[in-house]
Image (spheres, rainbow, N blue to C red):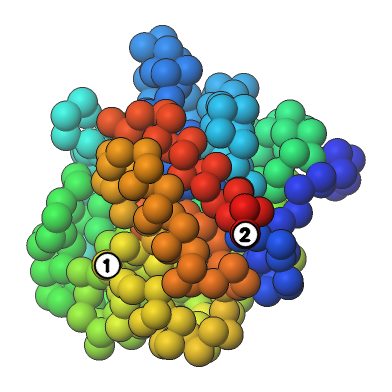
Amino acid sequence: MPHNFPELKNDLFLRALKGEEVERPPVWMMRQAGRYLPQYMTLRKKYTFFERVETPELACEITLQPIDELEPDAAIIFSDILTIPQALGIDVDLVKGKGPVLENNIKTEDDAFSILAEDVPQKLDHVMKAITLTRHELNGRVPLIGFGGAPWTLFCYMVQGEGSKTFDKAKSFLFQHPDAARHVMKELTKATIDYLNAQVDAGAQAIQLFDSWSGLLSPDDFNEWALPYLMEITKAVKGVPVILFAKGSWYALERLSYKSGASALGIDWTISPEFAREKTRNEITLQGNFDPTRLLSPIPEIKKLTKRMIDRFGTQKYIANLGHGILPNIPVDHARAFVDTVKEYGSEM
């Protein structure tokens, strides 16, 4: 179904994902559409979180806010990783001061076996509409990234029923009921593949897969409960590059770079650029890894640290980003200093 999108004017991000030579690294920030922007807070007062996600015009407006404000090299659609659990029949609410709460979470083996991935793109059609609308409204300024949560991370929320630092209930369920857990993972994998390919059809020009809690798994458990599903999804996404962000799974960098089929790997701030390059033998594009809290440093310090980060990663096969999402208490001019420093890198030499 042709959408007749405007021609892309800034393809720096896509070229870096392909490993092509670039004049400077591209830059964007995870959660760049969000709570640190005053214009976002205005909409937040008027609409609930899921009203913002589920109204294509609002999701489009929010996606464009950081593009207008900071002019990074890519936009990422405003949505949430918990859209898939919603499409699978789990009720998700965002409770102030607590975060996501999933009321009818998986408590028994029967609950797990009742999860079925059916008609996921149709149930999440509002995301596709938001992507198509945003592609038109971007008018080719920068590429648009679509995204989803990885099966292990979604499983964590669907069993735990809320956010957690340890996801102890989810891990306990995994080891006590492996067959039921495997069923959920397979359904989540199918749902995610359908969802991400629908995003591509709607106009997403790259995909990021967030495995935010994979670092809770041991290397052996990662190999069993995260890696196979990450590989299956990455290889099934059609026609656009995929960025895998397995937060905390530093031990898997080598394996992910050779086996996953991803175009790039996201790196969190606990990994040194040198370690990441060594483990991936400089054969894959890396994205990251500025500590989001460091954006609270004085602006001269932000500039110095950002330059040092690029010096260490190198300008090629590299996308400058944070090591996780931007925090709500970051001043806008600090975020701008980060983006501008990357954009100016090399020009003053």
* Image position, residue 40 (x, y; %): 45, 21
Q: Which residue is mark 2?
A: 349
Could you tell me if residue 316 is visible in this image? Answer: yes
* Image position, residue 65 (x, y; %): 56, 27
Front residue of this view, candidates 42 and 282: 282
Front residue of this view, candidates 19 and 167: 19
**Residue 128, placed above or below residue 188:** above
Front residue of this view, candidates 313 and 117: 313
Please tell me which residue is depicted at 75% across the width and 39% down the height of the picture: 141
Give the amino acid type for the residue marked by disc 2 in the picture: Met
Element carrying mark 1? loop
Please tell me which residue is depicted at 68% across the width and 33% down the height of the picture: 134
Q: Quadrant of residue 101?
A: top left
**Residue 180, placed above or below residue 145:** below
Q: Quadrant of residue 332?
A: top left
Q: Quadrant of residue 123?
A: top right
Could you tell me if residue 259 is visible in this image? Answer: no
Give the amino acid type for the residue marked by disc 1 in the picture: Thr
Please tell me which residue is depicted at 33% across the width and 73% down the height of the picture: 272
Q: Quadrant of the C terminus?
A: bottom right
Q: Residue furthest front?
A: 349
- Please tell me how crowded label 2 is: few (under 14), some (14-19), or many (20+) other residues with Cα within 10 Å: few
Residue 57 is left or right of residue 175, and the answer is right
* Image position, residue 167 (x, y; %): 15, 59
Residue 314 is left or right of residue 155, and the answer is right
Q: Which residue is mark 1?
A: 270
Element carrying mark 2? loop
Q: CA distance from mark 2 to mark 1?
A: 29 Å
